[in-house]
């Protein structure tokens, strides 16, 4: 905890008045306070109260905060304020584990920095490297990148370097390291200046994160707003114990029961995400999938449709459980229970954000009991069962079975189309190789 919080505990009740009430109280400059106001950020969150004043003093930071706590603002505001004081290109680098999170951080930087003309560039996989190289050549103020693609550009894009960098941010550092980006992070640390400010944000303090902290930060200040794993107070959490073979019917029952809400449904695999989306569409629900096997454009398209409320159900793998700010999720359903208990916290963190209330419902089959007990142990509470009418669920089984059949057929057709596209690509490649070889033979004959 930062010193301010400890003093608050020891002081008289009146001392609470001293707590900063606005971004201006934290030392944020007027033009950025106005930007916060336009975004609807009235009062700073706990992590912002702890981290912003320390960052403005020029200190390195380790920020430990639960998902949905306003971490992006905690590092974006000090960076933008420093940029105002000493304007320069290629000023800050933000490393993130996933593409979606990179785009989201970029949006927040652009929104906060719109009045001061901030330029950002997102450098992630799944997008054409040539257009990225052109964007880097324009020298943006802030680069938001996934480690793998950034290293690619550092090694192969002529004229691009980060030797003048002033700020490095590692957001979701625990996840960056869990996704085996250690080698890439090492390479990046070797080619950026030692004389820089570093902000490391993480939901959890793992051994890997501690090791990274020692390697990358100088005398950092620790800003922790939740030392133990916890879920937001306004989140109502439930579980349903069900036979595995009736999972789909129970899902349809809940969607009907809670109709009018927006849902985020988590599945464990890309295939199951796609299958369940097709199943729900066959039953008339406006469902859209989001998973790692979709192209980047499709992923962003799905996210934007859900954000714009054109779709009320988003089915996703854990690619969407961390860091995505989707403001209007009312209910999170863990259709497949997460294998890692910590992922439960990140999944349910998609709802009850920014002080609103929300619901989460976890499906527990006969095969998931141990995983569920681990989750309860981690969050330190026993979850109540969601009230159900079993007879009503059983009445749905026939319609659901028919929709399952259609979903399987569509899934098979999609798979066949994909395979035939790949075969066409392979054929084209083979023809290209044959032509090259033939061309080479002709040239050789001429030479003789």
Image (tube, helix red, strand yellow):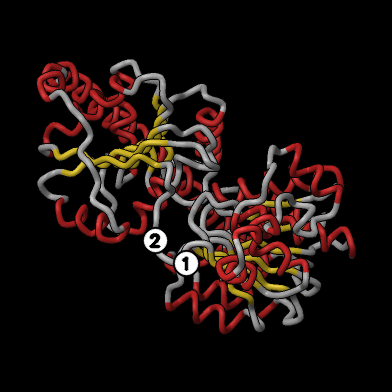
Image side of residue 166 versus residue 209, left or right: right
Local secondary structure at mark 2: loop
Nearer-N-terminus badge (1/2): 1
Q: Secondary structure at mark 1?
A: helix
Residue 380 rendering spot, x and y as whole percentages: 29, 58
Residue in front for this viewpoint, 173 or 372:
372
In the rendered image, which quarter contains the N terminus?
Answer: bottom right
Q: Which mark is residue 229?
A: 2
Q: Nearer the viewer, residue 251 or 45?
A: 45
Residue 185 vertical placement versus 142 (above, below): below
With respect to residue 82, does 368 lie above or below?
above
Q: Quadrant of the C terminus?
A: bottom right
Nearer the camera: disc 1 or disc 2: 2
Q: Residue 238 is drawn in which quadrant?
A: top left
Residue 82, image x, y percentages: 82, 63
In the rendered image, is residue 448 in sight? no
Which quadrant of the structure image shows residue 335?
top left
Which residue is located at x 18 percent, y 34 percent? Answer: 247
Q: Position of residue 219 (x, y in %)?
A: 65, 83
Tell me the quarter of the picture where residue 327 sits. top right
Local packing at callout 1 (Cα closer than 10 Å; few below 14, some 14-19, many 20+) is many
* Image spot of residue 407 (x, y percent): 26, 26
> In this rendering, would 236 be left or right of 37?
left
Q: What distance separates the C-alpha of mark 1 from that of mark 2?
A: 14 Å
332 versus 345 height, above or below: above
Residue shown at 52% from the left, 24% from the top? 309
Residue 246 appears left or right of 353: left
> On residue 441, which mark appears?
none
- Residue that appears at 46% across and 40% down: 352
Task: Tell me the tag on residue 174.
Answer: 1
Q: Is residue 120 above or below residue 301?
A: below
């Amino acid at each position: 905890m930062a010193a301010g919080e400890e003093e608050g505990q020891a002081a008289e009740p009146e001392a609470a008045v001293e707590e900063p009430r606005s971004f201006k109280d934290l030392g944020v400059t007027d033009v950025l306070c106005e930007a916060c106001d336009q975004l609807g950020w009235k009062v700073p969150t706990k992590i912002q109260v702890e981290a912003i004043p320390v960052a403005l003093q020029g200190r390195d930071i380790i920020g430990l905060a639960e998902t949905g706590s306003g971490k992006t603002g905690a590092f974006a505001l000090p960076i933008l304020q420093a940029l105002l004081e000493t304007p320069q290109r290629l000023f800050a680098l933000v490393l993130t584990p996933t593409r979606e999170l990179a785009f989201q951080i970029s949006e927040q930087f652009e929104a906060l920095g719109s009045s001061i003309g901030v330029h950002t560039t997102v450098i992630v996989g799944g997008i054409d490297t040539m257009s990225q190289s052109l964007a880097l050549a324009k020298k943006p103020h802030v680069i938001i990148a996934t480690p793998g693609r950034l290293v690619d550009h550092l090694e192969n894009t002529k004229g691009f370097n980060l030797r003048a960098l002033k700020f490095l941010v590692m957001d979701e550092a625990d996840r960056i390291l869990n996704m085996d980006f250690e080698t890439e992070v090492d390479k990046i640390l070797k080619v950026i200046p030692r004389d820089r400010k570093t902000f490391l944000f993480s939901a959890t303090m793992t051994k890997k994160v501690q090791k990274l902290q020692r390697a990358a930060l100088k005398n950092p200040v620790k800003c922790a707003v939740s030392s133990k794993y916890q879920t937001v107070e306004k989140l109502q959490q439930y579980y349903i114990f069900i036979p595995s073979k009736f999972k789909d019917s129970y899902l349809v029952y809940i969607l009907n029961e809670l109709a009018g809400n927006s849902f985020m449904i988590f599945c464990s695999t890309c295939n199951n995400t796609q299958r369940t989306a097709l199943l729900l569409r066959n039953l008339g629900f406006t469902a859209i999938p989001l998973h790692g096997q979709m192209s980047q454009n499709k992923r962003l398209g799905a996210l934007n449709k859900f954000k714009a409320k054109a779709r009320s159900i988003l089915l996703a793998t854990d690619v969407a459980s961390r860091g995505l700010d989707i403001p209007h999720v009312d209910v999170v359903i863990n259709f497949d229970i997460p294998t890692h208990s910590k992922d439960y916290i990140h999944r349910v963190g998609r709802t009850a954000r920014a002080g609103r209330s929300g619901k989460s419902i976890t499906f527990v089959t006969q095969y998931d009991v141990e995983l569920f007990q681990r989750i309860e142990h981690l969050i330190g509470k026993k979850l109540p069962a969601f009230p159900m009418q079993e007879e009503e669920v059983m009445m749905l089984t026939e319609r659901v079975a028919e929709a399952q059949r259609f979903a399987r057929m569509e899934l098979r057709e999609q798979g066949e189309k994909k395979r035939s596209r790949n075969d066409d690509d392979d054929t084209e490649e083979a023809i290209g190789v044959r032509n090259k070889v033939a061309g080479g033979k002709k040239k050789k004959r001429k030479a003789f």
